[in-house]
Amino acid sequence: MSIDQRLRERVVTLINRGMQISGMRLQYADPDGSKAIAETSGWFASSTNAIETVFPNASHAYRTTLARALNESNTGVRVAKIAEIMKAMLIDIDAGVVASVADVARGEVFDDFLDHADHYLKAGKVGPAGVVAGVAFEDTIRRACEKNAILQKDVELEQLISALVKADLMNSVKATRARAAAALRTKATHAQWGEFSKNDVEATIATTRDLVGRLLAS
């Protein structure tokens, strides 16, 4: 499953707890009411975080629906609506719809990282640019492997690139560029600043953008 299983289980737990909370009578004047209020507030925070984690784009329908629900003045109605949002989200997760949304969002996040790398380059900070670009490249390769059911944990980048080639997800030309980016990743993370240049970082950024567009955003 592309969406982390722990996140799915968390959503299920939140839905069940939300149903319990929505059936509670919150006695705000009661001495024990503070505990119920605090628990409900925590549920709102956890539920909002879960939805925003799956849909980081604030303009997505789930996020705009969540925003309207959070504006409800009645606590019980607010809880019930957010619980229903998560039920619908769970259906989409199980149907595989959310996976593609998450991949697109992840691609947008990688674009932000790569933009930062570009800014470092323009400021003449080749070392930091190499680190950021290298990290984004490696994460892209590993995410691409996860998406295509290729075991990636504790596997070297070189082997993962070969696995993507074998799976017909990368041709020989792109594999050569990917291996060059992997080499930069190693040099940058070991602070071998003199071992790579501005051109190397630019090539890694371009390679990573290409991979994100082809392997994660589709």
Image (spheres, helix red, strand yellow):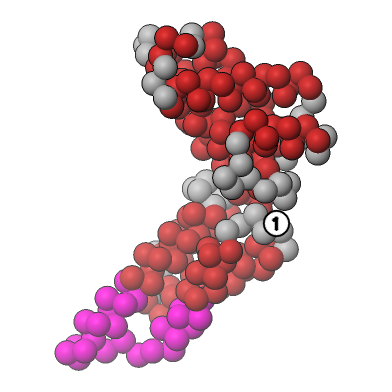
Image side of residue 86 versus residue 149, left or right: left
Q: Is residue 88 visible?
A: yes
Indicate whether 108 appears above or below 114. below
Q: Is residue 122 above or below residue 130?
A: above
Label 1 element class: helix
- Whether 65 is drawn above or below 189: the answer is below
Residue lying at 31% horizontally and 87% vertically, measured from the top left: 26
Q: Which residue is mark 1?
A: 97
| Residue under the image location 81 percent in, 39 percent down | 167
**Residue 189 position in % (x across, y down):** 43, 27
Quarter of the figure with residue 40? bottom left
Residue interval drawn in magenta = 15-41
Where residue 119 appears, as percent x and y from the top left, is: 42, 18
Name the chief secondary structure element in magenta.
Answer: helix
Neighbours of disc 1 within 10 Å: few (<14), some (14-19), many (20+): few
63 left or right of 91? left
User: Which amino acid type corresponds to the residue marked 1 in the rendered image?
Assistant: Val
Looking at the image, which residue is at 63% across and 45% down? Answer: 152
Residue in the picture at 81% in, 35% down? 166
